[in-house]
Amino acid sequence: MRGENICGCIARNIGRAAEMDAFELFRSREEITAGREAMLEWYAPHSRVKLLEYLKNDLRLAPGVRDGFARLKSDGVKIALVSITWQFAVEWLANDLGADYAVGTGWDEHDKIGHFWPEDKAIWLLSLLEKLEIEANSLVAVGDSYGDIPMLKLARRSYYVGDTLPSELQHVNHWPDADISAIVSDVLERKETGDQRY
């Protein structure tokens, strides 16, 4: 995404933008848990189909993401969208973009939340790599927030596209607001030459 995220897009469309802005400031697990529970109350009058329609109409993708994903797929690279946002939305986006795997925070038919946290990103990716029998040093990750730090630290090669590089990620390639197709070009070029250096 660029600018507004999935939850922000939905919140704006259902008249909850101010509450969502406040939620974005939450940092503790307790605050975020309470915020997720509040979001489900906001969503109650709306079907998931309707919530996804808002995303289909308004979500602004990062530049080059469709072209970049198509090139990765054509080169046989597996793509996973790993997010702490709602899994139903991440799965829709993965399907729309042609990603192979998606994970996020669950929301079941009984309105129970299956929380997914930043540290779960690295754990989930390691499990996926093991399942696919892919070497961990083949993992490349792209992120734009503090919630991506565990995943970006895990990957052999990482790109941070947010404005300010967190101090924990000094080894990561800092490409603020990068076009995703440019990152894909860099990844595929290094793949071809066998260059896995940071």
Image (cartoon, helix red, strand yellow):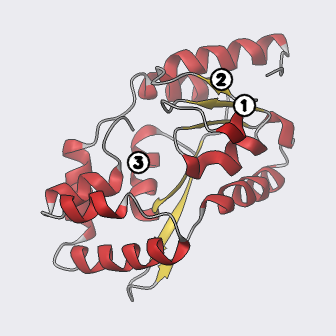
Q: What element carries label 3?
A: helix
Which residue matches tag 2?
75
Q: Please, which residue is most extreme toward the left here?
A: 15
Which amino acid, mark 1?
A: Gln
Spot occupied by residue 104 in the image (x, y as percentages of width and height)? 52, 62
Disc number placed over residue 170 in the picture, else none = 1
Image quarter in which the C terminus is found:
top right
Horizontal arrangement in the rendering, residue 191 relative to residue 184 (left or right): right
In this view, the residue in front, 72 or 157, is: 157
Is 13 placed above or below 99 here? below
In this view, the residue in front, 183 or 19, is: 19
Please report the residue visible at 30 percent of the width from the left and 62 percent of the height from the top.
22
In this view, the residue in front, 132 or 176, is: 176
Closer to the eye: label 3 or 1: 1
Please report the residue visible at 82 percent of the width from the left and 10 percent of the height from the top.
193
Q: Earlier in the sequence, mark 2 or mark 1?
A: 2
Q: Please, which residue is most extreme toward the bottom here?
A: 110
Q: How many other residues sit within 10 Å of disc 3, few (<14), some (14-19) or many (≥20)?
A: some
Spot occupied by residue 58 in the image (x, y as percentages of width and height)? 21, 43
Which amino acid, mark 3?
A: Leu
Q: How many other residues sit within 10 Å of disc 1, few (<14), some (14-19) or many (≥20)?
A: few
Which residue matches tag 3?
93
Q: Which of marks 3 and 2 is nearer the N terminus?
A: 2
Q: How many labels does the image show?
A: 3
Disc number placed over residue 27 in the picture, else none = none
Is 188 placed above or below 128 here? above
Spot occupied by residue 122 in the image (x, y as percentages of width and height)? 72, 54
Please report the residue visible at 29 percent of the width from the left and 36 percent of the height from the top.
60
Contact? badges 2 and 1 (CB < 8 Å): no
